[in-house]
Amino acid sequence: MKKNVLSILDIHKEIQSIIDSGMQLKQQYAQNRLKPVLMDKTLAMIFERPSTRTRVSFEVGMGLLGGHSIFLTKNDIQLGSRESAEDIALVLSRYADIIMYRAVETQHLIELAMHATVPVINGLDSREHPCQILADFMTIKEHKKDFNNLHFVFIGDGDDNLTHSYLLGCPLVGMHITVISPKHYWPAKEYIEKARKLANQKQLSVKITDDLSALTSADIVATDTWISYWYEQTRQQRIADFASYRITPKIMQQAKPDALFMHCMPIYYSEEVEKSVAHGPKSIILDEAENRMWVQMALMKHLLLEP
Ligand code: CP
């Protein structure tokens, strides 16, 4: 039975083993003993939005495992106008063994996943970014050794794909989560409710606040752009609303002394974070970017070889 990963909840049982598998693949590569376990497998990637990390990490990762990748842009495929999501799903499934899709319309992602006979991975939509948080969690595990009782604090836009995935993912791996955001930008209710339900099962906390003093308990401080693709029209309003939530060295000092800084990139240095923080001693942003590749290799391996 094929499995899709549109939300981090789709791998709620396997999340820890996929993270561990990503760490093992990284180690195997360093020791020159990585095996081409996906030889002759093909990944079809559809990008309706720009990408650096997602495209390159999937393509290089598939190559390291012996497979290869096809890259299709919005102009090539014209999903929803030239051809239906259903027909594209059925046709691509005859050529490729796995599909990664960065969709503009979530409905197209859902339809593609429903009709494809091969696994479909969400490469970011307006609701979630599961591959990114898998990489982020692998990076946290590398630096902090385990997740137990760590406090993950996200500062910035609460009502965004990455925050939604963090809200669901932190309780899954055993971390407390606080989202610090102006009230008008708090996460969608359904994600808060789901996160609280997951957290309650493990005596973990989920806190949503506009108060920056909640930062004092942070083991990890994360942020993201204030202006995701779909919010471009409200750019100036957002810059004004988020101005006091910009991460500066002074803000970082309020977190625990050994707190780490994370950002999924791309970074807007004049907006959500100062360059001295993003490239400072507490930052692990480049490990995060690298680990996209290792953990996505583990994810593809899981979906193709251990369904
Ligand atoms: N973090 C991330 O998804 O980067 P890209 O948009 O460059 O793929």
Image: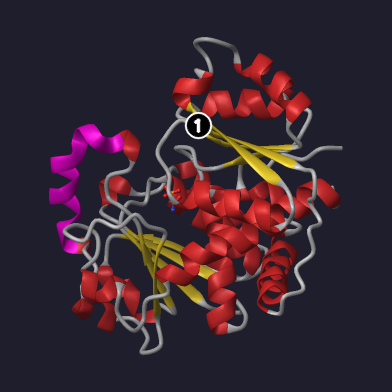
Mark 1 lies on residue = 103
From where the camera sits, is residue 287 visible?
yes
184, above or below 23, in the image: above
Tell me if residue 191 comes above or below residue 206 in the rendering: above
Does the magenta run of residues contain 72? no
Furthest residue to the top? 82
Element at label 1:
loop
Few, some or many residues within 10 Å of mark 1 (<14, 14–19, 20+): many
Q: In this view, does 185 lie to the left or right of 169?
A: left
The colour mode here is secondary structure
The residue stretch that appears in magenta: 231-244
Query: Considering only vertical position in the picture, is 144 above or below 56?
Result: below
Q: In this view, does 83 lie to the left or right of 236?
A: right
Q: Going by the image, does 195 lie left or right of 37?
A: left
Residue 73 image offset from top left, x and y in percent: 48, 29
**Residue displayed at 59% across by 50% down:** 58
* Residue 242 located within the stretch drawn in magenta: yes
Residue 149: tell me if it is visible.
Answer: no
